[in-house]
Image: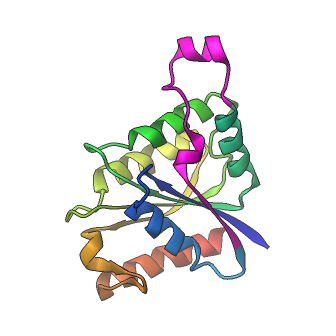
Amino acid sequence: MKSILAIGASSSRTSINRKLASYTANQVADCMVELLDLNDFEMPIYSVDKEEELGIPNEALKFKKQIQDADGIIISFAEHNGSYAAAYKNIVDWTSRIEGKLWEEKTLFLMATSPGDRGGQTVLASATSSYPRMGANVVSEFSLPSFYENFSDEGINDETLKSAFETQLSKYIQNI
């Protein structure tokens, strides 16, 4: 059975990106879903000095193990001032120091959502362009604008957005 690692790249307890990542992962039939909570991976803010003083934190090692154990990864990014949420960026910074390519050549579906009409497009574009250099096989990407208007417990409400999402989900499923 395939294993999907779903990450809502926000530390908010009510994260809309965590909801989108969970929803998406649960659309993949016949797989086990592991939904990460970034709050389980709190570490000191990364710096070379901290790394030399403390070594790699156990939380970063656990995050890396989650990546290694997954067949596919789904990430939905929160956008804070046009970039990654600080908690998520810190986890990536620490974990990338462990070995080689952070994403282990895993198949990734990258997404973003926000309450606004751009749907986190700036952070999504940044990840889509940089993650392949970090060992990611990015096969799908999707931005959901105006989360509260376009998403409910049943999923994506807008038919055009739903169709675009399903196309990207299908590409992802074919590649894991």
Quadrant containing the N terminus in the rendered view = bottom right
Please report the residue visible at 72 percent of the width from the left and 66 percent of the height from the top. 3
Of residue 101 and residue 32, the one placed in the foreground of this image is: 32
Q: What stretch is highlighted in magenta?
A: 32-57
Decide if residue 142 is on the left or right side of residue 41: left
Percent x, y of residue 149: 24, 77
Q: Does 42 appear above or below 143?
A: above
Decide if residue 48 is on the left or right side of residue 142: right
Q: Is residue 40 magenta?
A: yes
Please report the residue visible at 53 percent of the width from the left and 32 percent of the height from the top. 93
Q: Does 63 appear above or below 148?
A: above
Q: Does the magenta stretch include residue 87?
A: no
Percent x, y of residue 142: 40, 66
Decide if residue 90 is on the left or right side of residue 4: left
Q: Residue furthest right?
A: 1
Percent x, y of residue 100: 68, 33
Of residue 74 and residue 151, the one placed in the foreground of this image is: 151
Please report the residue visible at 27 percent of the width from the left and 68 percent of the height from the top. 145
Percent x, y of residue 155: 42, 82
* Number of numbered discs on residues: 0
Quadrant containing the C terminus in the rendered view = bottom right
Color theme of the render: rainbow
To which quarter of the image does residue 42 belong?
Answer: top right
Q: Which residue lies furthest to the left in this view?
A: 117
Q: Does 29 appear above or below 121?
A: below
Please report the residue visible at 21 percent of the width from the left and 62 percent of the height from the top. 116
